[in-house]
């Protein structure tokens, strides 16, 4: 589960279908609960094939997605075992290392030197800045060390793929020329995330009520208290709020909402089920904490919501808000402002025609500009150029 795994899978299976070989080196599945999935326990290494993708799963130190120290050990263990595990993967023409986390990038630089092949560094988030924004602060020895690692990875890569154009200025400021940066945003699998008319199946207990949903990670960056505070302000309405997913702050959020009858929490579901659930919402909420760095971020769940034809209440400024307004696909509110969110939800709940318009606009826009069946080719062309520039065999 999770946006990083979904991105890797969606691009990889399309590259395989285009005639290329793809091997994914990843940890034994345990995210985000820190409990190894059934069928994978007590294994140091496991090989699988999924939709033509060769998957090499390697041991990692398992811990829940909470707490800086233990999570850092988890990241470090993957970096080390990825370096060792990479030796078993033969006939490689190019390596993609996807960050965050940092040690995946370090493993990529090791593989580049070991195999004498080009490295494409994929930057999905601006670490360590995003870490500083929500967890460890912006100063100190640790941050200085992480910034050195960040700069080293950028300068070691033959090309850098970024998911948001707003990342460009930050990376160029480290001395990377603009020609080495390539924008390949997240997108939507339109065959999976699409409008699904009909009665609710997963949320039938709330039939007849306006259903507001947050589906995704319950983490430190997401500012989900804002949604709960809005729900408290809307306790006198027919709206019901449902949270689906896992994350470091889920139990704390459940305690925060323990006295609220209009809020429900559900555990994680398979990706196919999530697509069905999204299409049953009346309104979807996307939220991040109010910090300047997050103005560069485009939450990947936006594209899936839009693909499902659901109007959005968006509490993220910057790049994400620009996409929403360009599509005319929902209502933006200032990040962290529960009163503004409550007002936006009242407006959407009271106007079914407006929700329908936003939903149609969203579905049309995301298929026109963020369809993975198009984006995979952009990414693949970038990889082929990197291979040719280094004398590889694409």
Image (cartoon, rainbow, N blue to C red):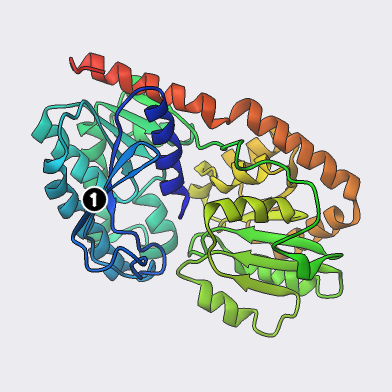
Residue 292 appears in the picture as rendered: yes
Residue 318 appears in the picture as rendered: no
Quadrant of the rendering where the N terminus is positioned? bottom left
Label 1 Cα crowd, 10 Å radius (few <14 / some 14-19 / many 20+): many
Question: Foreground: 109 or 264?
Answer: 264
Quarter residue 253 falls in: bottom right
- Residue at the spot x=23%, y=39% of the render? 153
Eyeballing the image, is 131 above or below 111?
A: below
**Residue 222, percent from left and from top:** 54, 60
- Residue at the spot x=51%, y=42% of the render? 296
**Residue 70, percent from left and from top:** 28, 70
- Marker count (numbered): 1
- Residue at the spot x=75%, y=80% of the render? 261
Residue with the most extreme left position = 114
**Residue 221, percent from left and from top:** 49, 60
Instruction: Give the side of residue 276 with respect to residue 83, left or right.
Output: right
Quarter residue 41 falls in: bottom left
SS of the residue under disc 1: helix
Find disc 1 in the rendering and name its residue. 103
Eyeballing the image, is 45 above or below 295?
A: below
**Residue 120, percent from left and from top:** 29, 31
Instruction: Give the side of residue 116 with respect to residue 157, left or right.
Output: left
Residue with the most extreme bottom position = 259
Quarter residue 248 falls in: bottom left
Question: Foreground: 390 or 17?
Answer: 17
Eyeballing the image, is 246 above or below 21?
A: below
Quadrant of the rendering where the C terminus is positioned? top left
């Amino acid at each position: 589960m999770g946006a990083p795994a979904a991105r890797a899978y969606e691009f990889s299976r399309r590259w395989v279908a285009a005639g290329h070989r793809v091997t994914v080196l990843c940890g034994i599945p345990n995210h985000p609960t820190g409990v190894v999935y059934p069928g994978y326990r007590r294994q140091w290494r496991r090989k699988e094939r999924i939709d033509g993708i060769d998957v090499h799963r390697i041991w990692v130190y398992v811990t829940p997605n909470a707490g800086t120290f233990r999570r850092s050990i988890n990241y470090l263990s993957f970096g080390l075992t990825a370096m060792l595990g990479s030796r078993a993967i033969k006939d490689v023409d190019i390596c993609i290392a996807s960050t965050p986390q940092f040690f995946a990038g370090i493993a990529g630089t090791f593989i580049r030197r070991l195999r004498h092949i080009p490295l494409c560094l994929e930057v999905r988030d601006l670490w360590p800045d995003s870490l500083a924004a929500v967890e460890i602060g912006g100063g100190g020895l640790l941050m200085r060390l992480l910034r050195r690692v960040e700069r080293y990875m950028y300068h070691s890569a033959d090309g850098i793929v970024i998911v948001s154009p707003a990342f460009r200025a930050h990376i160029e400021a480290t001395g990377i020329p603009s020609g080495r940066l390539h924008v390949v945003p997240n997108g939507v699998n339109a065959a999976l995330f699409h409008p699904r008319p009909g009665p609710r199946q997963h949320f039938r207990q709330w039939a007849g009520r306006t259903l507001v949903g947050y589906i995704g990670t319950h983490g430190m960056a997401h500012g989900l208290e804002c949604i709960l505070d809005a729900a408290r302000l809307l306790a006198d309405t027919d709206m019901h709020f449902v949270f689906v997913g896992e994350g470091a702050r889920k139990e704390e959020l459940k305690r925060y909402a323990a006295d609220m009858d209009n809020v429900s929490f559900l555990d994680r579901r398979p990706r196919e089920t999530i697509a069905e659930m999204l299409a049953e919402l009346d309104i979807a909420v996307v939220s991040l904490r109010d910090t300047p760095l997050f103005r560069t971020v485009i939450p990947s769940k936006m594209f899936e919501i839009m693909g499902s034809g659901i109007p959005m209440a968006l509490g993220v400024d910057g790049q994400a808000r620009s996409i929403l307004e360009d599509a005319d696909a929902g209502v933006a509110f200032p990040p962290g402002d529960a009163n503004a969110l409550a007002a936006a939800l009242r407006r959407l709940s009271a106007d079914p025609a407006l929700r329908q318009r936003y939903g149609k606009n969203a579905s049309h826009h995301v298929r026109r500009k963020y369809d993975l069946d198009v984006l995979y080719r952009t990414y693949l062309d970038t990889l082929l150029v990197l291979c040719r520039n280094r004398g590889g065999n694409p």
